[in-house]
Image (spheres, helix red, strand yellow):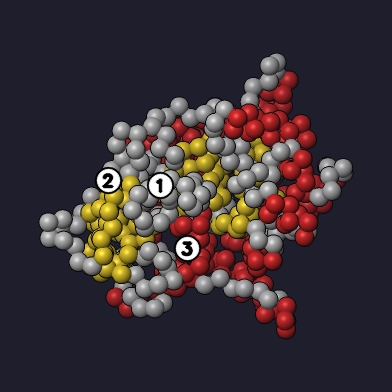
Amino acid sequence: MILQGLLLTDPAQPPQLGWIRVDPPAAGVPGRIAEIGHGELPSDLGPPDFGGRDRIISPAFTDAHFHVPQVESVGADGLHLLEWLDRVIFPAEAWWGRGGAMASARTSARRLIREGTAGFAGYLTSHVEASRDVAMYFARKTPMRFHLGRSAMDRNAPDELTAEDRARAKQSPTPSPLLPTLDVEPKQNRRFVSANPRFAVACSDELLAEIGWAVAEREKAGERVLVQTHLAETKPECELVAELFPDAPHYTAVYDQAGLLRDGALLAHGIYLADDELELIRERNAAIVHCPTANLFLESGLFNWTRAAFDFGVRVLLGSDIAGGPDVAMPRVARSMIETAKALKLTRSGADAERISVPSPAEVWKLITEGNATIFGQPGAPDRFGVLEEGAHADLLVLRVPDAWRDEHLVGRLIYSWSSRLIEARVFNGQHVDPANIERQTGGSPC
Ligand SMILES: [Zn+2]
């Protein structure tokens, strides 16, 4: 497959005309970028299958925090986190135990693909069987890459969502709190089961320790298991955690003591963290997933990116946090990251205001393509994601933009005027993918 266009190799630089030859997936090898050429397309290769001289070619997006069962729960406004979980989210997730899981899976897949998201780190519900079916659906029916885990929880939520973990803990021998390894071949380094203790409020000490143990066991057996959880999203949640874990020095330590604060762990939100918590997160090489749209929607707070990333050197990624966040589209989440930094700056004055960094459109574009994709492969590793480089996994977008956009503000225009209609073609795992075909293949309702 040949793609032609202006290659957005580095969003801080003007894109240059070029072409990309893509190899489709074959015999256990993922679809990869086989060759990148600069300048005009050689006549023996043309015409291109997708793109053209005036199109933009970008790596596709990765979302570092997404809840599959919440895809239809967007827009339930007027509530704060703990009340919103009780009144909106837990009832929605309970539907997975009554046959609603596959509908959420199909809708999530269609919306993510439509908005150009090729990879994500996501949560399922606490239902083992339904969660496993949904992970298998993503693996078999979509070309997406993912880390997906069931939301483990055994307290402070309805029985329907906590019963499986409470019953499991009483069985002998105790089955794993994690989903089984996905039975899909070839794995292609794109599909992983993760460990997702929901958050400390909904997990007992015992459950957290058990998950930490299960992750360590899987890793000893050579499996890669990412930990995903929520941390310090709101003040009432932090107060509740302090009551529930009176012996822990702080919220972050609750996860650390259970062996969950590990290399690559994805800690969503992290708004209310003390200095020693940020230091511990950096020491353990965990990452904070900034969810700016969700932080505003639930009025949780303004995450201080400058403090976490620059003062403490913590790795910060970006997540939609559907349905706390209302936008699936990662460019809109990226825009909200810029706006959050600007809003935070406006709450300060003098030298305090000057110390707040506002990320540029190029920086946030790089974060939703290359930065977030590091959850699948670290820089320097043999598998590369989210970049226009020979040998990298071929997850690409062909964008068609108005002529007037092709100036030095191109990336700013993409961020601030984003629409999925700008995407002319999506190539995920080296294959052309059409969100409409995902609907037809699976019989889902249009949305
Ligand atoms: Zn979340």
Q: Position of residue 337 (x, y in %)?
A: 57, 66
CA separation in Å, label 2 and label 1: 24 Å
334 over 157 or under it: above or below? below
Q: Which residue is mark 2?
A: 23
Asked whether residue 421 appears in the rendered view, the answer is: no
| Mark 3 Cα-neighbour bin, 10 Å: few <14, some 14–19, many ≥20 | many
Q: How many marks overall?
A: 3
Q: CA distance from mark 1 to mark 3?
A: 24 Å
In three-dimensional space, the C-alpha distance between marks 2 and 3, rounded to whole angstroms, equals 24 Å
The answer to whether marks 2 and 1 mark residues whose Cβ atoms lie closer than 8 Å is no
In what element is the residue under mark 2?
Answer: strand
Q: Relative to 371, does residue 15 appear above or below in the rendering?
A: below
Sequence-first disc among 1 and 3: 1
Residue 289 x/y as whole percent:
61, 54
- Observer-nearest of 96 and 361: 361
Comes first in the chain, label 2 or label 3? 2
Q: Which residue is mark 1?
A: 110
Q: Where is mark 3, residue-wise?
A: 366
At x 33%, y 62%, the residue is 57
**Mark 1, other Cα within 10 Å: few <14 / some 14–19 / many ≥20:** many
